[in-house]
């Protein structure tokens, strides 16, 4: 008996390629450790407002919204993120006082990296 008809061979190949799709996704291009740490903070805390632009928060990856903010430089952006800004529409440390200054700086660096 011939088990491996062309139709069966096709199904086997199809099965294998579908199996390939269900494998866990590779992480996106490797980030520098500080940016990866920043991304974790952004994904947990900052995204609540910066994901959608709540109250005018500059949206992640939106070059237009970040365009006039970036020239202030990293240190000013970081101090605004740590201390709060715009009558605390941007709350100190994004409203999470448990974050260290370094974590907030990494988060800001990550945000900046998305629009540079
Ligand atoms: C409760 C909502 C909210 C959360 C949470 C939040 N932000 Fe913001 N953020 C804002 C808003 C609103 C603005 C824009 C303020 C303005 O310019 O009117 C802003 C602006 C900023 C700016 C630009 C400041 C400037 O000088 O232009 C930075 C940098 C920033 N946020 C970083 C962060 C980081 C880092 C986190 C997480 C640790 C975070 N934000 C979490 C609301 C938020």
Image: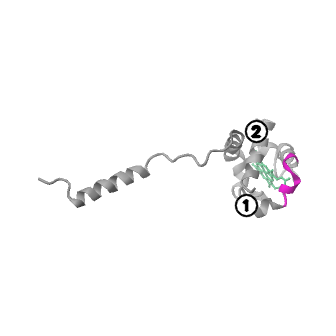
107 with respect to 78 (left or right) = left
Label 2's element?
helix
Q: Residue furthest left?
A: 1
Marks 2/1: CA–CA distance: 22 Å
Query: At 59% across and 49% down in the image, what residue appears?
Result: 28
Quarter placement of the C terminus? bottom right
Residue stretch in magenta: 68-75
User: What residue lies at 83% left-to-right and 45% top-to-bottom?
Assistant: 78
Q: Does the residue labelled 2 lie within 8 Å of ligand 1?
A: yes
Q: Earlier in the sequence, mark 2 or mark 1?
A: 1
Residue 103's disc is 2
Q: Where is residue 92 in the image (x, y as percent from the top left)?
A: 83, 44
Element marked by disc 1:
loop
How far across and how far down the image is residue 53, in percent? Answer: 73, 59
Viewer-closest of 46 and 54: 46
| Residue 83 lies in quadrant | top right
**Residue 84, magenta (yes or no):** no
Q: Mark 1 points at which residue?
A: 62
């Amino acid at each position: 008996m011939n088990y491996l008809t062309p139709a069966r061979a096709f199904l086997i190949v199809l099965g294998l390629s579908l199996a390939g799709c269900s494998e866990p996704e590779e992480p996106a291009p490797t980030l520098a450790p500080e940016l990866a740490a920043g991304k974790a903070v952004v994904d947990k805390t900052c995204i609540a407002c910066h994901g959608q632009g709540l109250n005018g928060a500059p949206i992640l990856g939106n070059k237009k919204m970040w365009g006039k903010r970036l020239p202030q430089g990293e240190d000013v952006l970081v101090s605004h993120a740590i201390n709060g800004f715009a009558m605390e529409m941007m709350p100190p440390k994004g409203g999470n006082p448990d974050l260290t200054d370094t974590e907030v700086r990494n988060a800001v660096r990550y945000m900046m990296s998305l629009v540079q």
